[in-house]
Image (cartoon, rainbow, N blue to C red):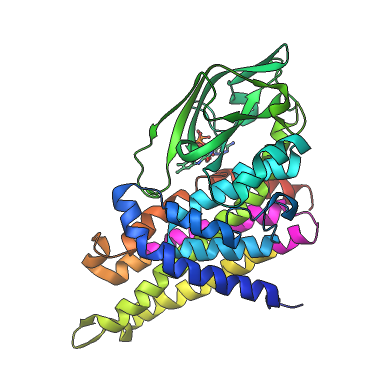
């Protein structure tokens, strides 16, 4: 057994860390306060491979392994939760389905411009006003074939990046009869007639990562915009989310690491009862638990990623990694605020933002309840 990163992964970690420290982390408060997306991160991160992590090299991507993706996501999460979320939504949700399931025509048309960070981003629309966890039963956005086009009607919500995207890959009901083979993924360019992208949601955290409602009013796109196989949209979505969950785990580890670093700094600086608060055992135990949980979560995230890289089943491990890492990040950020005392509640310090950002990680790409269902099903099946 070898817990070391290989040389390539170590170099990648160093490059991404230095980039995040210079271009992303210093702007984390600003993008949150102003609800602005950090475009500089895309323009400068693209050439490093950060906008084409899952895109094959022949389409201009970096095509790094999954462990390297999690390394990048931990660093991005360490720097800024908002920017990290938009990057994972672009890489895993926005370009992933095209790279994995798309036709050669779709790959050629979209992936080269997505991979270099020169244009806008990618987005995936699954969730609807009345359906999130239950996509199979609850999804109502429909697509009908008319001649050589799909005609799409319906509404989506919470689409990360939609307002800064070239297209929204949309999960639709393509067979009104319903069932597990009634959904399909269709790529809808954001300038398509009849597509309306609402204003960015007013969120608790991750305020520098725009999420939008999207409505489809007789939107027409060519039949060739089908991503993958007609009727396999649910299965393609679940496969996409399995990988996405590992990356949300990576972001969670990064957020927690940043909160611990802030706490350690504060524990050295802040004095009470004539001594640095880091000399109180109560504070030390909080820091010890943080270090312990971050280490454990990172190992789980890396293991799930490694399984994927080996071509082995990883669905259960991905669910476990995301569940543990996201709930861990919330605990760590909670304690980071406690260590900061009243200052922890102030926007002048970073930990309150990290706490707000971490909160989403237990909800997006499968709530903690849904992940427990995934794990339980696997356990009951003896896997
Ligand atoms: C900031 C942000 C960004 C997002 N980005 C995207 C995106 O890019 N694309 C996208 O499509 N979606 C996105 N989402 C939506 C997100 O994936 C959903 O919110 C999430 O999947 C939960 O769905 P829901 O909100 O409809 O909750 P619901 O499904 O209505 O669930 C509500 C509650 O019921 C529980 N519950 C539901 N079913 C069960 C069950 N069977 N057993 C036990 N408990 C259950 C849930 O755990 C939850 O606690 C985003 C959301 C946010 C907040």
How far across and how far down the image is residue 41, in percent? 46, 57
Is 286 or 164 nearer to us in this picture? 164
Hey, which quadrant is residue 313 in on the image? Answer: bottom right
Horizontal side, residue 82 vs residue 234: left or right: left
Q: Total of numbered circles in the picture?
A: 0
Is 30 or 42 nearer to us in this picture? 42
Hey, which quadrant is residue 330 in on the image? Answer: bottom left
How far across and how far down the image is residue 261, in percent? 40, 74
Q: Residue furthest top?
A: 146
Q: Is residue 322 magenta?
A: yes
The part of the chain drawn in magenta is: 305-334
Is 248 or 332 nearer to us in this picture? 248
Overall secondary structure of the magenta section? helix
Classify the position of the N terminus by image quarter: bottom right
Horizontal side, residue 241 vs residue 162: left or right: right
Residue 7 visible in this rendered orientation of the protein: yes
Residue at screen point 39% across, 63% down: 333
Q: Is residue 98 magenta?
A: no
């Amino acid at each position: 057994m070898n817990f070391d990163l290989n040389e390539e992964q170590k170099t990648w970690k160093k490059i991404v860390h230095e980039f995040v420290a210079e271009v992303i982390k210093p702007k984390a408060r600003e993008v949150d306060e102003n609800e602005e997306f950090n475009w500089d991160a895309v323009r400068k991160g693209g050439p490093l491979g950060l906008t084409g992590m899952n895109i094959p090299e022949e389409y201009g991507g970096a095509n790094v392994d999954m462990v390297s993706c999690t390394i990048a996501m931990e660093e991005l999460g360490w720097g800024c939760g908002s920017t990290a979320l938009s990057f994972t939504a672009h890489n895993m949700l926005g370009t992933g389905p095209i790279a994995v399931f798309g036709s050669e025509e779709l790959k050629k048309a979209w992936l080269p411009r997505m991979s270099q960070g020169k244009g806008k981003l990618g987005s995936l629309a699954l969730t609807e006003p009345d359906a999130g966890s239950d996509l199979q039963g609850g999804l109502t956005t429909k697509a009908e074939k008319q001649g050589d086009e799909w005609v799409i009607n319906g509404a989506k919500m919470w689409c990360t990046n939609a307002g800064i995207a070239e297209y929204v890959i949309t999960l639709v009901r393509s067979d009104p009869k319903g069932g597990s083979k009634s959904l399909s993924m269709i790529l809808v360019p954001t300038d398509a007639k009849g597509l309306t992208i609402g204003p960015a949601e007013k969120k608790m955290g991750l305020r520098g990562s725009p999420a939008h409602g999207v409505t489809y009013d007789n939107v027409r796109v060519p039949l060739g915009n089908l991503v993958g196989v007609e009727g396999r949209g649910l299965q393609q979505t679940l496969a996409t989310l399995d990988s996405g969950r590992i990356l949300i785990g990576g972001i969670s580890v990064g957020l927690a690491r940043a909160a611990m670093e802030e706490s350690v700094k504060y524990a050295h600086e802040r004095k009470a009862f004539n001594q640095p608060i880091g000399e109180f055992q109560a504070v030390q135990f909080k820091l010890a638990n943080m270090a312990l949980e971050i280490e454990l979560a990172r190992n789980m995230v890396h293991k799930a990623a490694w399984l994927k890289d080996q071509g082995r089943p990883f669905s259960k491990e991905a669910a476990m990694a995301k569940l543990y890492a996201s709930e861990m990040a919330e605990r760590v950020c909670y304690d980071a605020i406690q260590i900061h005392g009243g200052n922890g509640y102030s926007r002048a310090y970073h930990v309150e933002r990290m706490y707000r950002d971490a909160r989403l990680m237990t909800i997006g790409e499968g709530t903690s309840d849904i992940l427990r269902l995934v794990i339980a099903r696997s356990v009951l099946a003896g896997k």
